[in-house]
Image (cartoon, rainbow, N blue to C red):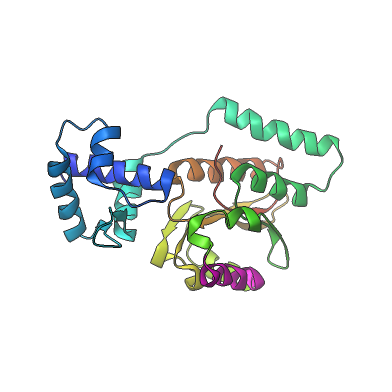
Amino acid sequence: MEERLQKILSAVIEEYTNTAVPVGSKILAEKYGFDLSPATIRSDMVRLEKEGYLFQPHTSAGRIPTDKGYRFFVEEIMGDQELTVAEQRKLQTEILKLKAQNQRMSRTTAKLLASLTGSLAIMGGKTDLHEFGISELLDNPEFQEVDEFCKIAQVLDYIDENVDSILRELRNGETKIFIGQENPIKQISNCSMIVSPYKTKNGEKGVLAIIGSKRMKYAKNKSLIDYMKKLISSGSACVVIFANINF
């Protein structure tokens, strides 16, 4: 893909991530410093749409990224992102507070992650799962419709059964990103998932996964998965499956 088209696709994804509103060429021209007219940007967006990277939900609306658009962004544009030292310390400090309060770490760590994300958090092993943040998840416009919420609720009812389908998709301890239709949990193909296996110091195995909107901040969330995996492997955290971490 040409560099200019990559920059336009990246800007569309950033704007849509922040607003959940279809993005028009005028907004891109005004906010993202393109030395291009709105007409030229619109022409490039039409090209991206024809090639399957963008989608126009309504004739008079702007455009939103497709699964293919997100996939290209994740693999070719995004790059890796490390948590800042301040962000790492924030997580460590909150975990230490919970330890000082003698709270049950496996439960309260998930609660902490739910409060940081404003979204859904699930924690535990295959047979011992806890849910947090359903009301926060519903604040996302994608999940306010009854049908979409019902799909999420059904997945939560059978999350222990879905863990096996997730594990089958993982290889060699890698952190993997699933977007939309790629999701191993087919009932929530409108969501994205970032997932990684882990192993604790005492040999217990499991998965860490973020499940949330396709508008999620992929680089930030992947870095959070990797950092939490590091804490768990060193014995500093608990088994957690969580969604949409945003500082």
Going 55% across and 70% down the picture, which residue do you hit?
A: 146
Going 28% across and 40% down the picture, which residue do you hit?
A: 27
Across and down, in percent, residue 117 comes to 59, 45
**In the current view of this chain or complex, which residue is farthest to the front?**
60
Q: For residue 219: magenta? A: no
Given residues 217 and 148, the one toward you in this image is 148
Residue 90 versus residue 240 in the image, above or below: above
**In the current view of this chain or complex, which residue is farthest to the top?**
86
Across and down, in percent, residue 7 comes to 24, 39
Going 59% across and 70% down the picture, which residue do you hit?
A: 155
Q: For residue 148: magenta? A: yes
Magenta stretch, residue numbers: 145-160
Residue 111 versus residue 81 in the image, above or below: below
Left or right, residue 177 beside residue 49 = right
Where residue 2 sits, quadrant-wise, is top left
Going 66% across and 54% down the picture, which residue do you hit?
A: 133
